[in-house]
Image (tube, rainbow, N blue to C red):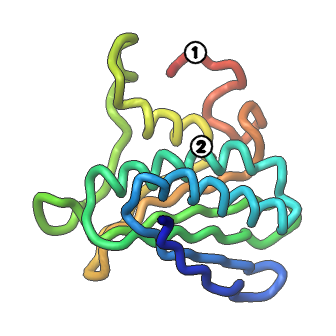
Amino acid sequence: METITLTPVIGGPAGHRRFWRLGREPSTVSAARRLIRRQLMEWAADELAEDASVITSELVTNALLHARGPIVLTVRLLPGTGAGVRIDVRDQGPCDGPGRTGIAPPASPPEHMETGGRGLHLVTCLAHDWGSVSGADGHTVWAVLRGPAGSPMSPCPKGSSSL
């Protein structure tokens, strides 16, 4: 059973924001992808839906695997025509200790046969920018999308084999 609390849109045309409190069930990741896709289509930002759903999947998965407490997924429409969106995933911090100071992508992609370690590389290639912030209320990893993969604003060229 999905534990998702829908919260109404907040803000005006240039500052639309939607957030959801997500449960810690196995179905949370697929539910988060669906929520992001639906919201971007509602905002007529369909061209960002595929990359946004992959980024959301990676960030929510990391929160489920490496953090504790509730997860809050937020998507915000950035001001300006075609400016993009920002996706935030907030959790209560790591399972094994207090707060984090930030996340950096691994220095090199994982070996070909490794089964994990690709998530933040995907985020790096798909997002225009991303990072993390820790505070008293938890830990947030965010990503900004400004255009489809391969656009002049994307750090990885379309068809990149760096993953």
21 horizontally vs 14: left or right: left
Identify the mark at residue 161; answer none if there is no mark. Answer: 1
**In this view of the protein, which residue sits in the foreground, 1 or 112?**
1
Identify the mark at residue 54; answer none if there is no mark. Answer: 2
Question: What is the crowding at mark 1: few (fewer than 14 residues within 10 Å), some, or many (at least 20)?
Answer: few
Q: Residue at x 45, y 55 (%)?
A: 60
Q: Residue furthest top?
A: 112
Q: Residue at x 34, y 55 (%)?
A: 64
- Residue flagged by tag 1: what amino acid is it? Ser
Residue 74 at x, y percent in the picture = 57, 71
156 horizontally vs 148: left or right: left
The quadrant where residue 82 appears: bottom right
**In this view of the protein, which residue sits in the foreground, 58 or 22?**
22
Q: Helix, strand or loop at disc 1?
A: loop
Q: Helix, strand or loop at disc 2?
A: helix
Q: CA distance from mark 2 to mark 1?
A: 17 Å
- Residue flagged by tag 2: what amino acid is it? Val
The quadrant where residue 13 appears: bottom right
99 horizontally vs 129: left or right: left
